[in-house]
Amino acid sequence: MNEAIYDKEFSPKVQELIELCKKHDTPFFMTFEFDENSVCTSSASNGHPLFMHLRALEQCKENNGVNVDRYIMWLMKEAGETGHSSCFLSQLGVPCVKEEPKTKDLTPKEEDLCVKLEAIKESEEV
């Protein structure tokens, strides 16, 4: 399909679908390919992880495929922020649970405990 056909025949119907989806608060993801190097994507999501992954994959498109390294880097960042249960991401060093920010105010007792735990970790590494 070429872009002229999309503009003339598909676009009006796609616009109708988009309006229906918005009216009924229905998430959607549509991609149309004009040729190997040109696509048109429309989407709206409610935060469902599938939509986030589809969007990320679309952003990682290159020539005749997907830049897998770029997608994995996105996946590692996302998993680090939200947590995951993947043995593969764990092997790559991504923590399974969301890391708490280290800027939290600690009580003096908690600070002392953290210092002691760090000292134990350092002694085990040697």
Image: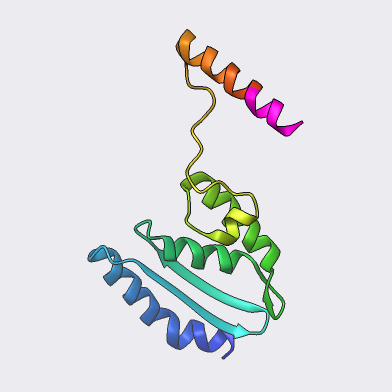
Find the residue positioned furthest to the top. Answer: 108
Above/below status of 1 relative to 112: below
- Which of 119/84 is in front? 119
State the image quarter where residue 88 is shown. bottom right
> Would you say 126 lies left or right of 44 here?
right
Tell me the chief SS of the magenta region. Answer: helix
- Which of 81/13 is in front? 81
> Would you say 114 lies left or right of 120 here?
left
Residue occupying the point 54% across, 12% down: 112
State the image quarter where residue 46 is shown. bottom left
Residue occupying the point 64% across, 49% down: 93
Residue occupying the point 58% across, 23% down: 117
> Would you say 90 lies left or right of 64 here?
left
Find the residue positioned furthest to the left. Answer: 24
Q: Where's the C terminus, which quadrant? A: top right
The residue segment tinted magenta is 120-126
Residue occupying the point 70% across, 81% down: 64
Q: Where's the N terminus, which quadrant? A: bottom right
- Which of 21/125 is in front? 125
Residue 84: image location, x then y, percent:
48, 53
Residue 33: image location, x then y, percent:
57, 83
Above/below status of 38 relative to 54: below
Find the residue positioned furthest to the right. Answer: 126
Determine if the magenta segment contains residue 69: no
Residue 111: image location, x then y, percent:
52, 14
Above/below status of 55 relative to 97: below
Above/below status of 121 relative to 3: above
> Would you say 81 lies left or right of 71 here?
left
Determine if the magenta segment contains residue 122: yes
